Amino acid sequence: MEPEAEGRMSLAEHLDELRRRLLRSIAALVLAIGVAFAFYRTLLDVATLPHFKAMEWCGLARAHSRLILCSYGPSVLAIAKLAFVVGFFAASPYIVREVWAFVAAGLRPQEKKYVVRFAPLSFLLFILGGVFGYFILIPYALYGMVQMMPAHQVQPLVDLGGYLNLVMTLTLVLGAVFQLPLVMVFLTQVGVVRASSWSAWRRPAIIANVLLAAVLSPPDVLSMIAFAIPLLGLYEIGAAVSRWVAGRAHRARPRA
């Protein structure tokens, strides 16, 4: 027991290690945000592409669809939030590495296995959700909202701050929504839900997905459809992978 006791850290050592890893993580985050803010013009060029694509679909040239600046404060704050979000994701691998190095020693082997297995997939699904929003949902949502307005009565003038907030909100929401298959597989693997239950719940899930799309997507039919279809696809993927995982675990069990 002596080697094990010697290998354990005291409370003061734990707190010191936590402080060092926290300071390194904060430093990495501040550095990443600073670099992102230094290139905010490039970030704006990338972030506004869905807007100009939607306006082009509406028949408006770039010169007549530029974003407007209604007031200084909200627009500058939106740019700062954009730099923060980009900087956070740029620094997130290092921050996750520091967090993992601190908590891994206190986890059981089974818990470590789940983290190692699900964390990279979660990050990948989040990126896929953001990519889907950037290239598909956001342009179609903007196009659908503009098309709702009568062209002979309404001239689309979009505020920069409001647009950036909408893009960041939809990106984060889609990143979270794309975690659905992973959550389903995890619940199946830990025994909370049977794999067969996901198929049995398909009809209620369709209704729930449509309602969720109506709540989370912008208020137009095109956006709701563009949001609901991937949700249904994600549910089916989660159900199929859950059945595969359950079947694999059943085959791996030793027969009596």
Image (cartoon, grey):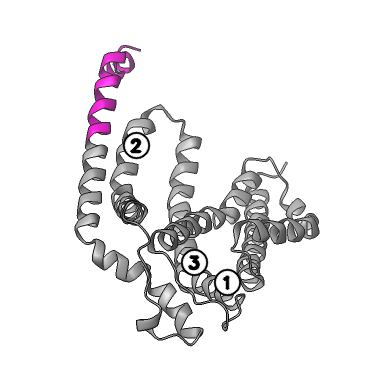
Label 2 secondary element = helix
View extreme (front): residue: 153
Q: Earlier in the sequence, mark 2 or mark 3?
A: 2
* Label disc, if present, on residue 67 of the rendered structure: none
Q: Nearer the viewer, residue 84 or 28?
A: 84
Inspect the image, locate mark 3, and give the three-letter code of the amino acid beneath it.
Answer: Gly
Q: Residue at x 29, y 64 (%)?
A: 43
Inspect the image, locate mark 1, and give the three-letter code of the amino acid beneath it.
Answer: Met
- Residue 14 lies in the magenta stretch: yes
Q: Is the C-beta separation of discs 1 and 2 under 8 Å?
A: no
Q: Check disc 3: other Cα within 10 Å, few if <14, some if 14-19, many if 20+.
A: many
Residue on which disc 2 sits: 99
Q: Nearer the viewer, mark 1 or mark 2?
A: 1
Residue 209 lies left or right of residue 45; in this view the side is: right
Residue on which disc 3 sits: 133
Q: Residue at x 27, y 14 (%)?
A: 12
Q: Nearer the viewer, mark 2 or mark 3?
A: 3
Q: Is the C-beta separation of discs 2 and 3 under 8 Å?
A: no
- The chief SS type of the magenta part is helix
Residue on which disc 1 sits: 145
What's the magenta region? 1-23
Label 1 secondary element = helix
Q: Check disc 2: other Cα within 10 Å, few if <14, some if 14-19, many if 20+.
A: some
